[in-house]
């Protein structure tokens, strides 16, 4: 290890131009990988549960895809004007090549392609017959027309064979609908539409984070080190690892997605935090005044090489702890952010020390002024720690105990309201369609059984219908039973299930000719499909509801029946649940691995235990505050703990390493010397890391905002721990040991 360090220093001190050229050559060559930058809009790629995947595959094989987009809008009543407007909208939608089919109230009427012919067809008696049909037959109620007849809905079936259908249709609808409706109210929803809206936020936030990240780097670098050469050096050292990381990312065929988009600001802030800490050693005026710059350069290189390497390892642990996630996207985030840390370490030392070998910063007067202004803070910290050690520890313990109930009472929730800001059109559309129609989400229950069309079995399915409708989360249940009862209600004495299987087949043929039967029964008539419209968007509640539906179905139906639940909404809920459970394990693994690093580095159980307490105390306390403020526990917020567990240990490691290597004779003198030398580097580093997380708070996408708020809070509490609680614990432990010796 020593020989490698000597070789590294030889390169940066004797071959600085070569090191700089190699780094910038790699930087410029990497831009070739940015030719094809794409956004990944696939939310389902992370599903790894074999049973879930098998059910999805079986559903697609029997029923095709379930993609649909809902367009709903209010009307005064079902009259001539409303039907003409509906016809005109349907015609405009049919002109879009991304649409395979449209279902609306017009399907009850005769299909006519000419507006003039349709106007002639809409005689008053036909409109009146339509109203009577809607009152008598509930098949279309809360589906194509609201119960009160004051709203209409179109169901769009996209053509997934069209290239990039999801994005193309999303863009086409966002252009067509505002032009058609003008200032009139309308609402668009559907899981497919929601996903594209989701990724629209990601693309916009990516641009914002990159801009804010570089602005933040520039402002803070100039504030701490007002030297134009140092400013350019810092920006290059910050930007190069991020560019190299994403060059490798794109070169491997990856796309930007929800989880990998934060790699950019993280790479910037991780690099900047380490660079600011590193450069600060070159601007301490007392060192410049008593030692030649050549000696200072060499001393700082070897002094910082080991602790910065350890910091990089702990940061890697924090990110790599997520590498066992069931979501490939989270694994990509874990691996490539870890790569950014790795590249940052080598680029930082290579570039910074090579340039500082050739150029000596000259702003000692500014630093001397900062040292004098910071003496009051150091004096306050010394007095607090040495005079009130017991109070510091008691207060810290009490605050931790007060936080525990909030941590263990966290509400797990991942709903639409936890992703989009209040007033966002996607939320108003969700609410309107939820209250006026069925859904807008659906759970798909597949039922197979040898005697699938037997009356006694269908009667049990009818019982299941009734029981599911008693659930407050269920708006509507649509199945073969719905079609049979609708038909018999229209053409006989009342809604009932026919006695004869032959009659049931005849009714199926009637609806099959209208393209409706395929929605509720497979082509071979061996699988029934129950479409359960639900009014909740919380993934965890959806998963629980799915389990309750399975329990009820298996209790009502005969043992020979096979019951499965699927659908994009349910599958995504399973994925979110699995991710959250996995993150909990990842966090535990991060604690264990970082503990082992502490033991290997400090070779002291007491110091390692103190360091562990100081670093994970802020995480639990920050979550307590977040949960108290109403921020829920979900994958977006839980991932902050794993990530920050590897980042906030940096200052603790620097501080304890400096304390551990200090040659002062007593613990008290070691602490005083450490506080004198480390207070401002720790503050600088923490300010950078805190602001780096705080830029996420400005996101209009709540998962990013929650992540940033929790991360920034962890940093704020962490710096208090490093500057007050950590020295207090060390001092209290030393006093306890000395008391035992007496």
Image (cartoon, helix red, strand yellow):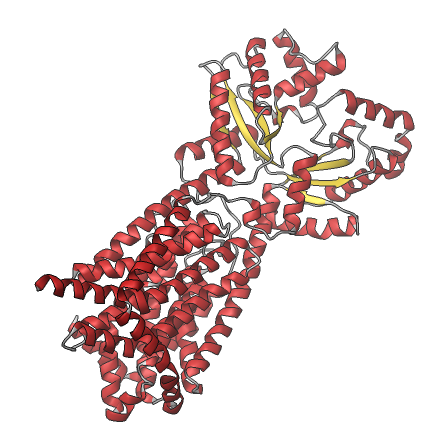
With respect to residue 560, does 250 lie above or below?
below
Q: In the figure, residue 460 lies in which quadrant? A: top right
Q: Work out whether residue 169 can be spotted.
A: no
Q: Residue at x 32, y 78 (%)?
A: 379
Question: For this view, does 216 lie left or right of residue 173?
Answer: left
Q: Work out whether residue 130 can be spotted.
A: yes
Question: In the image shown, does 312 or 225 lie closer to the viewer?
Answer: 225
Q: Residue at x 8, y 63 (%)?
A: 741
Question: In the image shown, does 689 or 627 lie closer to the viewer?
Answer: 627
Q: Quadrant of the N terminus?
A: bottom left
- Figure label count: 0
Q: Residue at x 45, y 81 (%)?
A: 223
> Where residue 131 appears, x then y in whole percent?
82, 26
Q: Quadrant of the C terminus?
A: bottom left
With respect to residue 70, does 398 lie above or below?
below
> Where residue 400 appears, x then y in whole percent?
35, 54
Question: In the image shown, does 8 or 531 lie closer to the viewer?
Answer: 531
With respect to residue 307, does 587 lie above or below?
above
> Where residue 658 appears, x then y in whole percent?
23, 73
Q: In the figure, residue 15 lies in which quadrant? A: bottom left
Q: Residue at x 87, y 34 (%)?
A: 80
């Amino acid at each position: 290890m020593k020989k490698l360090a000597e070789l590294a220093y030889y390169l940066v001190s004797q071959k600085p131009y070569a090191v700089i050229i190699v780094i910038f050559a790699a930087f410029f060559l990497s831009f070739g990988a940015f030719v094809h930058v794409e956004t990944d809009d696939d939310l389902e790629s992370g599903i790894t549960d074999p049973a879930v995947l098998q059910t999805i595959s079986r559903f697609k094989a029997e029923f095709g895809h379930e993609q649909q987009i809902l367009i709903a809008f209010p009307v005064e009543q079902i009259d001539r004007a409303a039907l003409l407007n509906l016809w005109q909208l349907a015609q405009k939608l049919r002109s879009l090549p991304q649409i395979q089919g449209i279902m609306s109230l017009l399907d009850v009427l005769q299909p006519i392609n000419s507006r003039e012919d349709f106007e002639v067809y809409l005689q008053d008696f036909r409109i009146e017959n339509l109203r009577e049909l809607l009152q008598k037959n509930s098949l279309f109620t809360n589906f194509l027309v609201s119960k009160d007849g004051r709203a209409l809905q179109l169901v769009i079936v996209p053509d997934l064979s069209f290239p990039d259908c999801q994005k193309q249709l999303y863009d086409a609808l966002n252009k067509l609908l505002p032009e058609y409706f003008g200032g009139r109210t309308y609402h668009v929803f559907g899981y497919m539409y929601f996903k594209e809206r989701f990724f629209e936020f990601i693309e916009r936030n990516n641009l914002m984070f990159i801009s804010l990240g570089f602005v933040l780097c520039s402002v803070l670098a100039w504030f701490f080190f007002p030297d134009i050469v140092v400013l350019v050096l810092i920006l290059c050292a910050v930007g190069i690892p991020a560019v190299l990381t994403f060059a490798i990312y794109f070169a491997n065929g990856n796309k930007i997605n929800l989880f990998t988009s934060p790699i950019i600001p993280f790479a910037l802030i991780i690099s900047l935090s380490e660079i600011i800490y590193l450069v600060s050693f070159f601007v301490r005026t007392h060192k410049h005044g008593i030692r030649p710059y050549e000696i200072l350069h060499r001393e700082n290189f070897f002094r910082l090489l080991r602790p910065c390497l350890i910091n990089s390892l702990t940061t890697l642990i924090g990110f790599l702890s997520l590498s066992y996630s069931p979501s490939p996207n989270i694994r990509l985030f874990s691996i490539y952010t870890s790569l950014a840390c790795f590249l940052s370490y080598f680029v930082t030392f290579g570039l910074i020390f090579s340039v500082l070998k050739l150029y000596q910063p000259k702003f000692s007067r500014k630093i001397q002024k900062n040292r004098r202004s910071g003496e009051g803070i150091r004096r306050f910290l010394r007095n607090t720690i040495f005079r009130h050690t017991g109070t510091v520890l008691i207060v810290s313990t009490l605050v931790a105990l007060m936080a525990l109930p909030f941590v263990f009472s966290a509400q797990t929730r991942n709903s639409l309201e936890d992703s989009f800001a209040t007033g966002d059109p996607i939320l108003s559309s969700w609410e309107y369609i939820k209250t006026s129609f069925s859904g807008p989400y659906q759970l798909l229950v597949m039922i197979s059984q040898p005697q699938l069309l037997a009356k006694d079995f269908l009667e049990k399915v009818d019982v299941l219908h009734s029981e599911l409708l008693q659930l407050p989360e269920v708006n509507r249940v649509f199945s073969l039973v719905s079609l049979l009862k609708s038909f018999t209600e229209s053409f006989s004495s009342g809604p009932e299930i026919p006695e004869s299987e032959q009659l049931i087949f005849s009714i199926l043929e009637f609806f099959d000719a209208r393209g409706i039967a395929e929605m509720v029964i497979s082509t071979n008539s061996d699988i029934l499909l129950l479409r359960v419209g639900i009014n909740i968007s919380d993934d965890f509640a959806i998963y629980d509801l799915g389990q309750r539906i399975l329990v009820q179905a298996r209790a009502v139906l005969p043992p020979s029946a096979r019951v499965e639940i699927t659908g994009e909404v349910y599958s995504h809920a399973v994925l979110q649940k699995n991710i959250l459970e996995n993150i909990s394990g990842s966090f535990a693994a991060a604690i264990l691995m970082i503990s082992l690093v502490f033991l290997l580095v400090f070779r002291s159980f007491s110091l390692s235990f103190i360091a562990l307490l100081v670093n994970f105390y802020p995480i639990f306390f920050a979550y307590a505050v977040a949960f108290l403020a109403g921020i829920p526990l979900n994958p977006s917020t839980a991932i902050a703990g794993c990530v920050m567990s590897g980042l906030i240990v940096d200052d603790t490691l620097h501080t304890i390493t400096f304390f551990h290597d200090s040659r002062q004779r007593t613990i008290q003198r070691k602490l005083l010397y450490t506080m004198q030398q480390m207070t401002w580097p720790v503050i600088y580093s923490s300010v950078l890391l805190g602001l780096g997380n705080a830029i996420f708070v400005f996101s209009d996408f709540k998962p990013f905002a929650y992540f940033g708020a929790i991360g920034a809070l962890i940093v704020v509490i962490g710096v208090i721990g490093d500057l007050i609680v950590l020295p207090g614990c060390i001092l209290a432990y030393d006093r306890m040991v000395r008391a035992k010796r007496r």
